Image: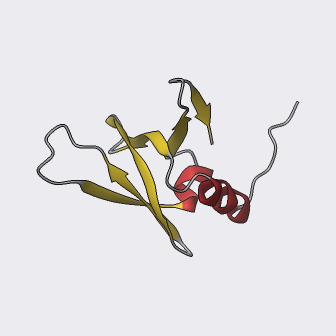
Amino acid sequence: MPKPQYTVLDIKKKVQKYQGQKVRLEAHKSKKKLYQKTGFIEAIYPSIFTVSIESSNNDHSQRMSFSYIDLLTNNVKIDLIENNGGLVSL
C-alpha cells in the first residue's frame, strides 16, 4: 500500500492545528548526529514555524525554527505529547 502524498500546505495546516501544544522533536544535526528536544510550537509563519525548547535551567529559553519542507522530507519529526503522556505523530 503506497504512502499518502502530502504537500507543504498539508503539513502547514497540521502544524497550525497544534500551535501552542507540547511536542517532542527529533532533528538531524548532521549525517550521524540526531538530537531530541521537548518544547511548544510557538509561532507559525508562511515558510517556517518556531518551537520554544524547554530548558533544564530556567535562565533562558531556546527557540528553534524549522521549515515545513523539513517535516515533509523527514529531516525533522514532531510528535504531539498528549496530556496522558502518549505521543501522536504529526
Q: Residue at x 61, y 60 (%)?
A: 16
Between residue 84 and residue 70, name the one nearer to us: 84
Q: Position of residue 66 (x, y in %)?
A: 45, 59
Q: Nearer the viewer, residue 9 or 23?
A: 23
Extreme-right residue of the structure: 1
Please, is residue 14 above or below residue 88 in the view?
Answer: below
The part of the image, by quadrant, that contains residue 24 is top left
* Residue ID at (15%, 45%): 58
- Of the pair 82 and 3, the residue shown nearer to us: 82
Q: Where does the N terminus fall, quadrant-wise? A: top right
Q: Is residue 54 above or below residue 46?
A: above
Quadrant that contains the C terminus:
top right
Q: Is residue 64 above or below residue 36?
A: below
Nearest the camera: 83 or 16? 83
**In percent of the image, x 22 and y 54: which residue is there?**
61
Q: x and y percent of residue 73 in the render?
A: 59, 50
Drawn side of residue 77 relative to residue 57, left or right? right
- Image point 29% across, 44% down: which residue? 54
